């Protein structure tokens, strides 16, 4: 399971024995895997400041969790064609998230333990706020690019009635700069090709003989040119419609066609260079601009960076990755690391508020082995640590579930400091 319970109990002899008892019972019953969770000696400050920090840390915890979930979702969206490899890119300090949590070490360089707690919390809050601000601006730019590419895809992959023609036609298909002649485009159903060839010259007066040519075809119809005198254009359109030949409005403007093609090249270049592993643009094999098909570089399976390598070092790595994905990977790592430090701070503050001074408690990280065992694990913990709050415990504990030497509860009860870490929210 990718779920963790972070608890603490006083560090005196009686409670250390209770922790050993908890470890023994949970291990024998295969309820959870337990490890010590190291939290440094932080500057306590005043009781009033701790009460205020308790509330602030609760809000910051919620904000950090929401932020990393949004970042994880952004990684999923950017890696649309490589969703099976998303978790390879959701790392913390170069290792998978479970390993980081179970081997957590306080980062003294980023969050000096000798600083007042309020300063440490302020550093974390500012760091996460900056990441969120950058995330908003980067994902907004990504969304604009995505929308533009999807619009171009619709224009370039529709049928002959709706799709853009600038990638199909050429200058040679038209009579241009003539005072008297004009070239029209007509869509003819496949079943009517023969009829078109036999009748187009007689649909109106002044149609240039043998001027028709098919320049494109899809599953339903063909696109034909026909040249005629300008003054019979409207008459020709009416007669063509009567015969179920559809006139396609199009004016050949070389500057406009060049502009549209350059815009397509620019957007595709942006997609490839800036968001290279994204596949929100034109799909492989679609009927795209012939000279500018999307080339999506697969993410591959890069070697996992070594633990201890800095995020900024890793940002320069990852060939085939665009800046957005690289930024997401680096800053997801930073946000996740900050989140676990917030959890550690919450345990520290709540332990001091609950167990008093001098600071003396032991934090333990429990990883439930299976979902079905969480209720039983909770009952074991409640019974082991019931002495921390005898009055409340006595009111809810009963003897309905028995383990030798233990009296268990069927209700949620926390006589100890408890916080929850759920990594399944990132799946």
Image (tube, helix red, strand yellow):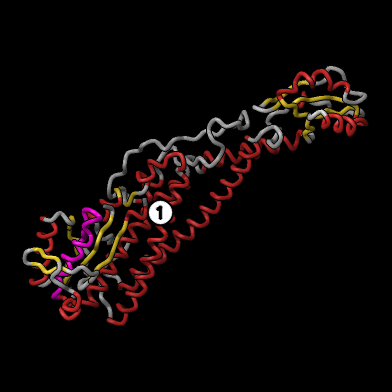
Q: Does the magenta stretch include residue 374?
A: yes
What is the crowding at mark 1: few (fewer than 14 residues within 10 Å), some, or many (at least 20)? many
Farthest left residue in view: 405
Q: Does the magenta stretch include residue 141?
A: no
Q: Name the residue under label 1.
A: 331
Task: Say what secondary structure mark 1 lies in.
Answer: helix
Q: Which of 14 and 315 is in front in this view?
A: 14
Q: Quadrant of residue 163?
A: top right
Q: Residue at position x 13%, y 56% from top?
A: 29
**Image spot of residue 427 (x, y percent):** 36, 50
| Residue 380 position (above or below residue 249) | below
| Residue 258 position (above or below residue 20) | above
Q: What stretch is highlighted in magenta?
A: 365-387
Q: In which quarter of the image is residue 198?
A: top right
Q: Residue at position x 20%, y 75% from top?
A: 396
Magenta segment, principal secondary structure?
helix
Q: Residue at position x 70%, y 32% from top?
A: 160
Q: Which of 278 and 107 is in front in this view?
A: 278
**Image spot of residue 344 (x, y percent):** 27, 65
Q: Which of 251 and 207 is in front in this view?
A: 207
Q: Residue at position x 79%, y 22% from top?
A: 196
């Amino acid at each position: 399971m990718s779920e963790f319970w972070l608890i603490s109990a006083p560090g005196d002899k009686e409670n250390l024995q209770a922790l050993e008892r908890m470890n023994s019972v949970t291990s024998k019953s295969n309820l959870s895997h337990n490890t010590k969770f190291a939290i440094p000696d932080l500057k306590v400050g005043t009781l009033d400041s701790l009460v205020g920090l308790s509330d602030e840390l609760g809000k910051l915890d919620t904000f950090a969790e929401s932020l990393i979930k949004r970042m994880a979702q952004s990684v999923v969206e950017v890696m649309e064609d490589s969703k099976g490899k998303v978790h390879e890119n959701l790392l913390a300090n170069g290792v998978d998230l479970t390993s980081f949590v179970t081997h957590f070490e306080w980062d003294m360089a980023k969050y000096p333990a000798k600083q007042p707690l309020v300063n440490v919390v302020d550093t974390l809050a500012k760091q996460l706020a900056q990441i969120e601000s950058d995330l908003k601006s980067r994902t907004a730019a990504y969304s604009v690019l995505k929308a533009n590419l999807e619009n171009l895809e619709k224009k370039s992959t529709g049928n002959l009635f709706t799709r853009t023609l600038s990638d199909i036609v050429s200058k040679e298909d038209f009579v241009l700069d003539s005072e008297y002649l004009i070239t029209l485009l007509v869509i003819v159903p496949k079943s009517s090709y023969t009829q078109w060839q036999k009748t187009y010259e007689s649909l109106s007066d002044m149609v240039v003989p043998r001027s028709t040519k098919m320049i494109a075809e899809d599953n339903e119809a063909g696109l034909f040119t026909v040249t005629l005198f300008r003054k019979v254009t409207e008459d020709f359109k009416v007669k063509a419609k009567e015969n179920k030949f559809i006139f396609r409005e199009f004016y050949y403007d070389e500057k406009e066609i060049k502009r549209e093609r350059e815009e397509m090249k620019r957007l595709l270049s942006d997609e490839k260079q800036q968001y290279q592993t994204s596949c929100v643009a034109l799909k492989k094999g679609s009927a795209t601009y012939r000279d500018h098909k999307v080339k999506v570089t697969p993410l591959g399976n890069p070697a996992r960076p070594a633990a201890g390598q800095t995020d900024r070092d890793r940002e320069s790595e990852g060939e085939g990755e665009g800046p957005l994905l690289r930024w997401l990977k680096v800053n997801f790592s930073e946000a996740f690391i900050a989140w676990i430090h917030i959890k550690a701070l919450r345990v520290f503050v709540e332990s001091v508020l609950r167990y008093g001074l001098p600071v003396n408690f032991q934090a333990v990280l429990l990883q439930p082995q299976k979902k079905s065992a969480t209720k039983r694990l909770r009952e074991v913990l409640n019974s082991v640590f019931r002495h921390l709050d005898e009055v409340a415990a006595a009111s809810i504990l009963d003897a309905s579930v028995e383990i030798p030497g233990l009296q268990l509860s069927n209700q949620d009860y926390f006589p100890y400091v408890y916080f929850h870490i759920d990594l399944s929210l990132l799946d």
